[in-house]
Amino acid sequence: MVDNILQKYINQDNIKEILGIPCECLIILKEFKSGEYNQNFIFPHPVTDKKYVLRVNKGSQLHLDNQIEYEYNALSLLENTGRTPKVFFVDNSKKILDDGVLIMEYLPGEPLDYKSDLNIAAEILADIHSKAYEKLRENGFRENFFRNAELTKEFDGVIISKSPLNEIITECNKMFDIYRKSDIADKNVIKKIDEMFLRAAGIIFDSRELQKYKATIINTELNSSNFLINGIDKENYLIDWEKPLIGDPAMDMGHFLAPTTTNWKTDTILSTDEIHNFIRVYKEKVGDRLPLYNIEERTKLFISITCIRGLTWSAMALVEYLGKVDRPTHADTLEKIQSYLKYEYLDMILREYF
């Protein structure tokens, strides 16, 4: 049920004016797909029937006080890509509502199918990375913003990831420490994941020269459900921009292709040939719009590091799930987390990706 305060909020005259809705018309909200950190509602334009999404922020994976403004800033920069929702309104004042809100256009489409839609996904990422790269530089972004830690941590309201491989490993260590110190910690799981940390340290050290890349806006959460697919030669999109960064496009590539991502909602693990073909199509679609120095090698690095991230998050999440008084309602999530920490799965990750 839609809260009366929220229903009253969306019918303010200033919001109607922004959306081109006559003041006398009533906007009716309906509940829509929601996540852990956001509630989403959908409503049609009373005259044109164009659909919009009202997004109510409930928390931040990036631990930001201005999370909804952060998403708005990123989506505003991405509008020229034609692959993301257009944003119309943001309010983080919390004067009327307790939470920040965002209004954006509704986009149609089905979740990505790893077996049939990989080339479409490659084209979506190529457009987003290339056109965002162009937009950032139009706005004055230069590599010294990215290289010099003393200059800035953000540009146009989006966080700059200056050393992504090391940043991810630091995050993973913090998550895994929660598991290490818990009563449910399995010594063999710790041993296997510690071996991944050890190998990753060598990979990162050996790859220092590969980290000379051109920064663009990246999504960082390329799960199949965040793609909206309508088919070849049709409009296809990438939504859910909770954690965008200015960083290495290979970070998105690695996250998308890693087994801990493809396995999350499906049973899919991409083959070596599928991974190589995806990168080939991505490079073809990018063309000369974005410098792609050593993109194959950098993507391979991020696949490995993404595996550690998925496994250490699962270990931390298992502690949190089993520590609840009530059993978690999302039994499928608990089952998937537990499957990621099975010895056979960990051995497969070590063998194939390290």
Image (cartoon, rainbow, N blue to C red):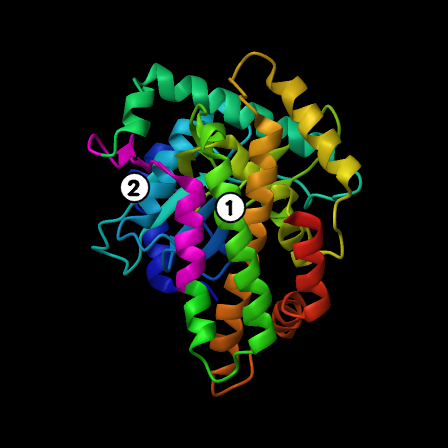
Label 2 residue SS: helix
Q: Which residues are magenta?
A: 150-174
Label 1 with label 2: CB-CB less than 8 Å: no
Q: Residue at x 68, y 37 (%)?
A: 229
For marks 1 and 2, give the CA distance: 59 Å
Q: Determine whether the residue tagged by mark 1 lies in a helix, strand or loop.
A: helix
In the picture, the disc for residue 339 is none
Q: Residue furthest top?
A: 288
Pointer 2: what residue?
A: 13
Residue under numbered circle 1: 202
Nearer mark to the viewer, of 1 and 2: 1
Q: Counting other residues with Cα less than 10 Å from the Cα at mark 1, is it few (<14), some (14-19), or many (20 or more)? A: few
Relative depth, front residue between 239 and 199: 199
Residue 218, compared with residue 133, is above or below; it is: below
Does any portion of residue 31 appear in the rendered image?
no
Residue 58, given in percent of the width and then of the height, sits at 37, 60
Q: Is residue 348 above or below residue 275?
A: below
Q: Position of residue 176 (x, y in %)?
A: 46, 66
Q: Quadrant of residue 90?
A: top left
